[in-house]
Image: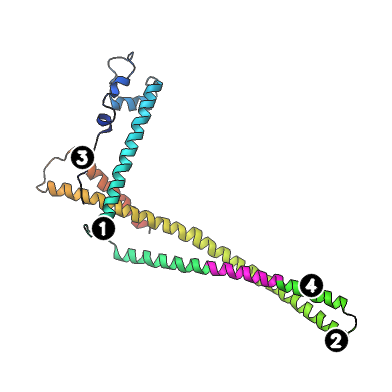
């Protein structure tokens, strides 16, 4: 599953004739190289680049970004496949991973609670509206009934009862809505922010393991010690420590 990582220099692979893009009228002391082209674009005292030069510089940055992204994506995918097939040992923190799983399960329960609380609020609001409609209907029947005093009294009592229930229910509905809003903030903001941190941590762990795998290969080839590392091996070493530091920082945030 593993494959050697080849570090390709963008200055020699994509644009081998970059020096031909330098303005001919520049002084001979100005280096005509890829690095000087970049320095020229960043130095305030350097001559203004022509449109073809700026276009070339833009393509250099684009290809370099694509190359770096492709390398990281390939390493990430390779690490995921190796972990799923059991061909490598992943970095594990048993206690932290257990807490993450408990957090995800807790978040699912809170989401279900939020869903049910919303339904309760909607249904209870419908009940209050029905009670107000009943109160109006009883009041209208009371006004229309003139032949039976007892029936008129019953309509009046029922209308008043439904009106009182609706009025008292408004306070309960308001409390339910406050609960729903607080629960929604907890689930969609607080817990979601924590979950995003967890996802960033898990991604950084895979990237760290991917570069740790490459770095261990470098160490195995130079196990005798005192051997000068090549440019590609030094790049792997720098990337290893970079992703290790990032992984440990995200781990500390959880």
In the picture, the disc for residue 225 is: none
Which residue in the structure is indicated by mark 4?
136
What range is drawn magenta here?
114-129
Taking the spot 36% from the left edge, 30% from the top edge, the residue there is: 59
Inter-mark Cα distance, 2 to 4: 19 Å
In the picture, the disc for residue 150 is: 2
Q: N-terminal of the two: label 2 or label 4? A: 4
- Residue positioned most to the left: 224
In the rendered structure, are the residues bearing label 3 and label 2 in contact, judged by CB atoms less than 8 Å apart?
Answer: no
- Residue positioned most to the bottom: 150
Which residue in the structure is indicated by mark 1?
83
Q: N-terminal of the two: label 4 or label 3? A: 4
Q: Decide which of 13, 39 is in the foreground and name it.
A: 13
In the rendered structure, are the residues bearing label 2 and label 4 in contact, judged by CB atoms less than 8 Å apart?
Answer: no
Taking the spot 29% from the left edge, 62% from the top edge, the residue there is: 93
* In the image: residue 222, left or right of residue 27: left
Percent x, y of residue 70 = 31, 42
Note whether residue 146 is visible.
yes
């Amino acid at each position: 599953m593993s494959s050697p990582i080849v570090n390709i220099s963008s200055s020699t692979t994509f644009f081998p004739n970059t020096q031909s893009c330098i303005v001919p009228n520049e002084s001979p002391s100005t280096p005509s190289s890829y690095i000087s082209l970049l320095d020229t674009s960043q130095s305030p005292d350097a001559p203004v680049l022509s449109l073809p030069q700026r276009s070339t510089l833009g393509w250099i940055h684009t290809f370099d970004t694509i190359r770096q992204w492709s390398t990281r994506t390939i390493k990430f995918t390779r690490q995921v496949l190796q972990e799923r097939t059991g061909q490598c040992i992943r970095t594990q923190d048993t206690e932290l991973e257990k807490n993450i799983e408990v957090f995800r399960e807790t978040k699912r329960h809170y989401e279900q609670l939020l869903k049910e609380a919303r339904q309760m609020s909607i249904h209870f609001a419908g009940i209050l509206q029905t009670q107000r409609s009943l109160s109006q209907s009883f009041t209208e029947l009371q006004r229309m009934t003139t032949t039976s005093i007892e029936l008129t009294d019953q309509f009046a009592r029922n209308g008043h009862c439904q009106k009182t229930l609706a009025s008292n229910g408004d306070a309960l509905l308001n409390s339910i809505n406050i609960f729903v809003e607080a629960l929604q903030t907890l689930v969609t903001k607080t817990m979601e922010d924590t979950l995003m941190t967890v996802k960033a941590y898990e991604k950084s762990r895979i990237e760290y393991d991917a570069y740790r795998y490459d770095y261990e290969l470098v160490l195995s080839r130079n196990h005798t010690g005192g051997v000068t590392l090549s440019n590609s091996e030094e790049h792997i070493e720098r990337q290893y420590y970079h992703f290790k530091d990032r992984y440990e920082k995200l781990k500390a945030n959880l």
